[in-house]
Amino acid sequence: MQRHLIAALAALLLPFAGAQAQACLGLASLTGTPTNLTVGALFTDGAKALEARVGIGSSIAFGGVSAQLWDHDDVDGTSKGIAIDGGLNYLVGVRRNVSVCPVGTLGYLNHPDVRVLGNNYGSSETYGTAGVAVGAELGTQSTMRLIPFAALQAAYNRFTVDAGAGSESNGETYGLLSGGLSFVLTPTVLLRPHISIPIGLEGSDPTYGVGLSFGFGRR
């Protein structure tokens, strides 16, 4: 009974957050402006979210802290999440304009209580990802500059249900393929549409997103 309840709540609430600096993640370089703020929205089947991320770093390493507010179609209340991410940046290619990055994310989501058969159940999830991302800035100052980017990561998610008298958890491991195409509007502002696709996770759906990123600060 508990396992079926966990599966039902997970299918209802799980938003497949993922994690998302620099060209390998579809963001502007942190070499000249060491900080950026990205705000946007996420959409998946049965849920949508607002997301904000502050990133810092250099041409070698980067990291960020992000927060999410998820609204679920069939659940009253809002899921609240926080995550940290980081990675290292390696430039490759003839012109050294291709960014290859080992990346990782750790996150936590707290879901609103759900009433089932007269009982209230709280739930939460912790997740982590690790893998490789790649991206490159294309174009010149006189043309529209684009940043195509993609990442392939291994992901782990643990969904926990608290029934008051105790808790029950269920963990799953799967793959996560993500990518997008950022449009560089100015040297410090870009538009970042993207998609994340879970691989090997039963009943999963893609998550679509779009964000606007602003770079600021000086070295």
Image (cartoon, rainbow, N blue to C red):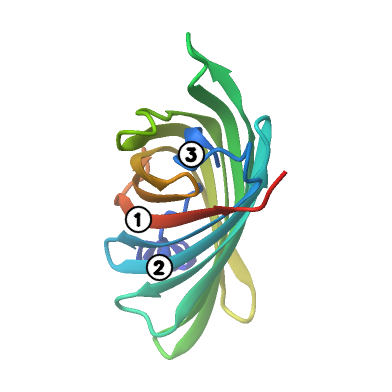
Of residues 57 and 121, the one nearer the viewer is 57
Decide if residue 191 is on the left or right side of residue 126. left
Say what amino acid the circle numbered 2 marks.
Answer: Ala
Quarter of the image with the C terminus in it: top right
Q: Quarter of the image holding residue 37? A: bottom right
Residue at x-position 54% and y-position 38%:
22
Of helix, strand and loop, which one carries label 3?
A: helix
- Residue at the extreme top: 94
Per the image, the residue denoted by label 2 is 49
Q: Is any atom of residue 97 visible in this view?
A: yes
Q: Is residue 204 above or below residue 1?
A: above
Residue at x-position 49% and y-position 33%:
24
Of residues 219 and 1, the one nearer the viewer is 219
| Numbered disc in front, either 2 or 1 | 1
- In three-dimensional space, the C-alpha distance between marks 3 and 1, rounded to whole angstroms, equals 13 Å
Q: Is residue 141 above or below residue 208?
A: above
Per the image, the residue denoted by label 3 is 25
Category of crowding for the residue at label 3, using alpha-carbon neighbours closer than 10 angstroms: few (below 14), some (14–19), many (at least 20): many
- Residue at the extreme right: 219
Quarter of the image with the N terminus in it: bottom left
- In three-dimensional space, the C-alpha distance between marks 3 and 2, rounded to whole angstroms, equals 20 Å
Residue at x-position 54% and y-position 77%:
122
Of residues 196 and 21, the one nearer the viewer is 21
Of residues 72 and 170, the one nearer the viewer is 72
Q: Quarter of the image holding residue 174? A: top left
Per the image, the residue denoted by label 1 is 210
- In three-dimensional space, the C-alpha distance between marks 2 and 1, rounded to whole angstroms, equals 11 Å
Of helix, strand and loop, which one carries label 1?
A: strand
Q: Earlier in the sequence, mark 2 or mark 1?
A: 2
Q: Residue 144, which numbered label?
A: none
